[in-house]
Amino acid sequence: MTTILNCLPQNLDNPACNDYIANTPLTDWMPVLEHLQQAYDLPAGTWEKIPLGGNALFGLGDEVIVKLAPPNWRRQGDKEILVAPLLENKLSLQTPRLIASGEIDHWVFVIFSRLQGTLLADIWPSLELEQKQAIMVQTGQLFRELRHVEFDAGIAIKVDWPAYIQELIDGCMARHQRRKMPEGLLAQVMPYIEAAGDFASAGEPRFIHMDIHPWNLMAKQEEGQWKLSGLLDFGDAIVGNSDRLEILTPMIFMAQGNPLLLKSLLEAYGEIEDIGTADFQRQLTAYMLIRPDSDITFCMQQVPVSGPRDTWEQVAEQMFPL
């Protein structure tokens, strides 16, 4: 059931949604937030607008987070509502507890408990290599836990794997063109994916968060060492058939081309089958090219340039130096 307050805009296209969420001041959101605060008996406190992610995100004191997903991206809100209870108390890291959910003006709202700690993105660049290795080990262990999360066979986020992969392949070129991929690399995308062969070969279905990176991980300091403490944001989660989609994001945004960090991650995960380095690099790069909403230029900027990047083979060796 949708509550109508006539406060949130309707029929916005994606660019207009992005603009509205990014640039609308907190005061304009307050009628919705105050309604939720009263309707769900949320604690007193000061609201803040949190400039993270694509959806509208707000904090109420130290206890509550509210996410508002516009109709364009309601699937992300629906996934948050489904996945939060699925993961609650199932992992070694904390996950947000679902407090309430529904619709206001056809926008999905999700009310969560607020995790304590520091966003990993705020400290990651300043950490010493040894500390990063320890966190990569934790991340690999998190992969193992997520891989073995139990779910109902008919769970709504389960995808038809062959059809899902083909849809990603079919849609990737338009995205790369729209984001101005260099022409030389653009022309090689489809031949490279085709040459990757069975890069999408299916294993058993498993839960895939798909967006594990420093902006979705919380950390706390214990005895002078930073440790992961929480996992956020389930809007991209699926149940699918390949761990490549899970390990890809932290390999790019946390390992950042460092072979020691890649090794720490993969050894802690421990569930990669025996595969040659070149084939594994090709699989990862093919997934990077087709991953939903992937901005390849931004991904490549995460890894220092150590040579030419005129071919995807050269890119693969730099992005995933195994």
Image: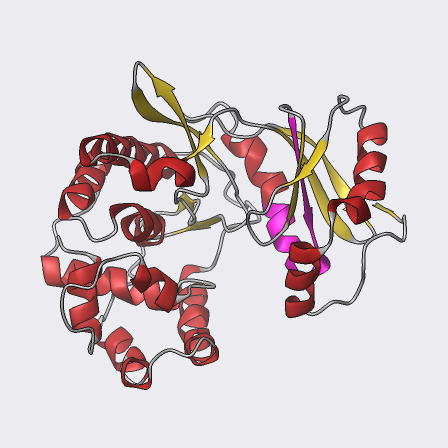
Q: Residue at x 53, y 33 (%)?
A: 86
Please tell me whether residue 65 belongs to the stretch shown in magenta.
yes
Q: Image check: 180 left or right of 62?
A: left
Task: Indicate the quadrant where residue 218 lies.
Answer: top left
Location of the N terminus by quadrant is top right
Depth check, front residue: 169 or 220: 220
Residue farthest along the right direction in this orientation: 5
Q: Residue at x 39, y 73 (%)?
A: 169
Residue 78 position (above or below residue 66): below
Please state the horizontal and vertical placement of residue 30, each as a whole percent of the image. Answer: 81, 41
Depth check, front residue: 37 or 223: 223
Q: Image check: 263 left or right of 169?
A: left
Q: Residue at x 42, y 49 (%)?
A: 210
Depth check, front residue: 165 or 307: 307
Please state the horizontal and vertical placement of residue 200, each as a whole percent of the image. Answer: 30, 62
Q: Image check: 129 left or right of 115?
A: left
Q: Which residues are magenta?
A: 64-79
Please tell me whether residue 85 belongs to the stretch shown in magenta.
no
Q: Residue at x 60, y 51 (%)?
A: 76
Q: Is residue 92 visible?
A: no
Task: Indicate the quadrant where residue 163 lies.
Answer: bottom left
